[in-house]
Image: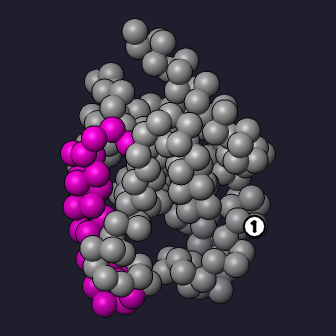
Amino acid sequence: MRHPPPNPQHVVLIGPMGSGKSTLGRALAQRLGLRFVDVDARIESDAGSRIPAIFASEGEDGFRTRESRMLAAALAEAPAVIATGGGAVLAEANRIAMRAAGTVVYLQVDATTQLARLAGDSGRPLLRGEDRAQTLATLQARREPLYRDAAHLRFETSTLGPEAAVAALVDLLASHKATLA
């Protein structure tokens, strides 16, 4: 499927939980002189409750509706680095909107690193089961084609520390922008 060239306004980070969207997004925004928007944080602020409570009261469908609304609002604002939730790609409308509003970067992470990064995290509703590795593998199998479809660029985060990753991301974005010029 061919996609129109990106509008370089936003840098939108997509990928599975634990890939570094929020951590790298904050540092990348600072480095690029842009605002940082964490869609999950906006959902919590708007709802007045944490994501696990939203899942408990509204289910995943209710959460995804909120996610789409907050993502659309962020994409309509001034240029920013936007960290999405891992499931933002599930809605085709979200994938189309992200691609149209900026450069979408798929942050990839290997399963071992992902598990290590999420080891102490109890605030992920989709990781409530006993076998986190299997849950993450199932989510990745379902979402991988969607991440690839939405992304203009792919970036591996498993082996780099945050500073090195941000420097490499800045270079990747600059090189991508140069190819579009």
Q: Which percent across, then down, holds residue 110?
A: 70, 52
Residue span colored magenta: 53-80
Task: Determine if the magenta segment contains residue 117.
Answer: no
Compare residues 150 and 10 and report the one nearer the observer: 10
Compare residues 97 and 142 and report the one nearer the observer: 97
Q: Is residue 129 above or below residue 25?
A: below
Is residue 135 visible to the viewer in this orientation of the structure? yes
- Left/right placement of residue 23 relative to residue 157 reads left
Identify which residue is drawn at 40% across, 33% down: 103
The residue pinned by badge 1 equals 116
User: Looking at the image, which residue sits at the far top?
Assistant: 181
Identify which residue is drawn at 56% across, 62% down: 17
Q: Which percent across, then down, holds residue 151?
A: 44, 37
Q: Amino acid at mark 1?
A: Ala
Q: Is residue 45 above or below residue 31?
A: below
Q: Quadrant of residue 141?
A: bottom right
Compare residues 80 and 69 and report the one nearer the observer: 80
- Left/right placement of residue 138 relative to residue 110 reads left
How many numbered marks does the figure carry? 1
SS assignment for the magenta stretch, majority: helix
Q: Which part of the image, by quadrant, shows the C terminus? A: top left
Task: Determine if the magenta segment contains residue 68.
Answer: yes
Identify which residue is drawn at 41% across, 68% down: 41
Identify which residue is drawn at 41% across, 79% down: 51
Kind of element beneath mark 1:
helix
Q: Which percent across, then down, holds residue 142?
A: 48, 58
Is residue 2 visible to the viewer in this orientation of the structure? no
Q: Is residue 31 above or below residue 124?
A: above
